[in-house]
Image: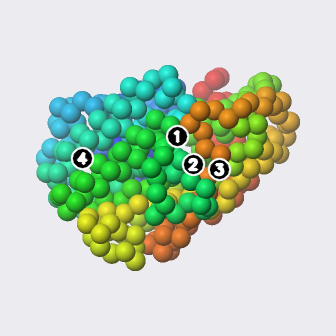
Amino acid sequence: MRVLVTGSAGFIGFHVARRLLTEGHEVIGIDGMTPYYDVALKRRRHALLRAYPRFVAHEIMLEDRAALARVVEGARISVIIHLAAQAGVRYGAHRPDTYIDSNVVGTSNLIDLARGMALDHFVLASTSSVYGPATDLPFIETERCDYPLSLYAATKKATEGLAHSFSHLSGTPVTALRFFTVYGTWGRPDMALFLFVDAILRGHAIDVYGNGQMERDFTYIDDVVESVLRVLPCIPVRGDKATGCSPVAPYRVVNVGNGQPVPLMDFVHAIETCLGRTARTNFMPMQPGDMQRTWADASLLEHLTGFRPKTSLRVGVARFVAWYRDYYARHDA
């Protein structure tokens, strides 16, 4: 396949692109290298991908429709995996414009240009955050998602709506994947695992929000990548209710999560055990936009692909810590 991966220097995009390349596919990567977090980390991810002869990278913003058109028009792309986004729940209080620009305008531009392509499949990243304050657990894809708690969730729900209308009008098969708290090697520095490991190793206290009472369905990056690749040949068919498809479009939503909510303090203890150090904790109140609990029903994913995420938190945290120590031993030297 020739696959367009947006956000190819991002956490999930890098891993997905690398897996595609190792399997012999061609990958066109797009990334805006935004400074939301360490751009050097993004560039090092891209540097690893550039070692593959079938990888081509373009440093552009999806909001720049003209630049995007120059990349995709005539490129004979068979699959789009749209992973680029302004991430993070709390950042929306400081820079709401970046969420609208990247998540809504950028996605709209990509979809508009995709209308002229004969795509086999359009896959886009959504998030467990769209479930908002829902109390029916575990979260299932048919749950109503009408009450987003953060701007991030609202914009990702908007991209689902844009993608559904695109699928209906163009007939293009679309799958929206709702990721649940992805973590692992080459992870984002703004996420809890990275922040906690970094602070504990430096002897700093960690901020534990929600007074430590929150729960998250942590999903290891390798399981996420496996899920994405296994979904690619699972083409949605309009009206196929048995596989979760829309009644009016070849479109479906699929949860990607471990299906095992973990109390936040158990997460902290797993990190402490791996590091052999005890964390100093600052218990903080729940932050605006945060969800109390996430828990994926991954039955549809397993039904479609025969796979469901299974990496234990202990194993996943250990792999991240090993990567972190190696990465910073080399790049801080």
Q: On screen, 133 above or below 9?
A: below
In three-dimensional space, the C-alpha distance between marks 1 and 3, rounded to whole angstroms, equals 13 Å
State the residue position of label 1.
149
Crowd around label 3: few <14 · some 14–19 · many ≥20 (10 Å) = many
Quadrant assignment, res 65: top left
Disc number lying in front (2 or 4): 2
State the residue position of label 3.
293
Do labels 1 and 2 touch, CB within 8 Å? yes
Query: Residue at position x 60%, y 27% from top?
Result: 331
State the residue position of label 2.
133
For mark 4, give the secondary structure: helix
In three-dimensional space, the C-alpha distance between marks 1 and 2, rounded to whole angstroms, equals 7 Å
- What's under tag 1, amino acid-wise? Leu
Quadrant assignment, res 188: top right
Query: Residue at position x 52%, y 63% from top?
Result: 140
Q: Quadrant of the C terminus?
A: top right
Horizontal arrangement in the rendering, residue 260 relative to residue 50 (left or right): right
Q: Tell me which numbered mark, 3 or 2, is placed earlier along the sequence.
A: 2
- What's under tag 3, amino acid-wise? Arg
In three-dimensional space, the C-alpha distance between marks 3 and 2, rounded to whole angstroms, equals 9 Å
For mark 1, give the secondary structure: loop
Do labels 4 and 3 touch, CB within 8 Å? no
For mark 3, give the secondary structure: loop
Name the disc covering residue 111, or none: 4
Query: Residue at position x 59%, y 33% from top?
Result: 288
Query: Residue at position x 81%, y 41% from top?
Result: 272
Crowd around label 1: few <14 · some 14–19 · many ≥20 (10 Å) = some
- What's under tag 2, amino acid-wise? Pro
Disc number lying in front (4 or 1): 1
